[in-house]
Image (cartoon, rainbow, N blue to C red):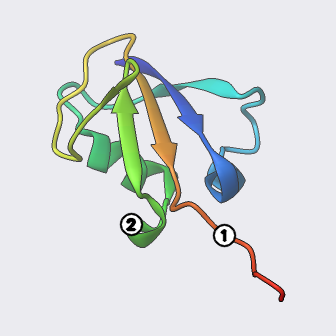
Amino acid sequence: MDIKVRLHGVLQHYRPKTLGGEVFALDVPEHATVEEVGRQLGLPETWVCLTFVNGEACRKNQQLRTGDLVAFLPPARGGTLEF
């Protein structure tokens, strides 16, 4: 089944080289979960802080449907304070 994926921040390095653009199509097995998509892309589990399906926050065990847009976000990174 075909879904769309958007990777944010450092996770963009895991976009398949043959697929360009901010959002890319990905073929996944029927009834795949968000977690399985992350594994298929090789995303380190500790690097994924938030996931969204069609703009709504979701759990990693959420099953996907054809055409869903899955977004993976890494933890927020901060800077340093200088006094």
Identify which residue is drawn at 38% across, 66% down.
45
Q: Residues within 10 Å of mark 2 (few under 14, many from 20)?
A: few
Residue at (62, 44) in percent of width and height? 8
Q: How many marks?
A: 2
Q: Work out whether residue 68 or residue 58 is closer to the camera in this orientation and state it.
A: 58
Q: Position of residue 52 (x, y in %)?
A: 37, 33
Q: CA distance from mark 1 to mark 2?
A: 20 Å
Taking the image as shown, residue 58 lies to the left or right of residue 22, namely left
In the visual, does 47 lie left or right of 1? right
Q: Nearer the viewer, residue 46 or 76?
A: 76
Looking at the rendered image, the quarter that the C terminus falls into is bottom right
Q: Using residue 27 as the reference point, say whether residue 65 is left or right of it.
A: left
Query: Residue 11, image x and y in percent?
Result: 61, 54
- Label 1 crowd (10 A; few <14 / some 14-19 / many >=20): few
Q: Is residue 83 above or below residue 46?
A: below
Q: Position of residue 28 (x, y in %)?
A: 36, 31
Amino acid type assigned to the residue bearing label 1 in the image: Gly
Q: Is residue 9 above or below residue 63?
A: below
Q: Residue furthest top?
A: 67
Q: Residue at x 76, y 81 (%)?
A: 81
* Residue 9 drawn above or below residue 64: below
Specify the label residue 34 is tagged with: none
Along the line of sight, which residue is nearer the eye, 6 or 58? 58
Q: Mark 2: which amino acid?
A: Glu
| Lower position in the chain sequence, tag 1 or tag 2 | 2
* Horizontal and vertical percent position of residue 9: 67, 51
> For the N terminus, which image quadrant?
top left
Q: Give the residue at the far front of this rendering.
A: 83
| Label of residue 45 in the image | 2
SS category of the residue bearing label 1: loop
Which residue corresponds to mark 1? 78
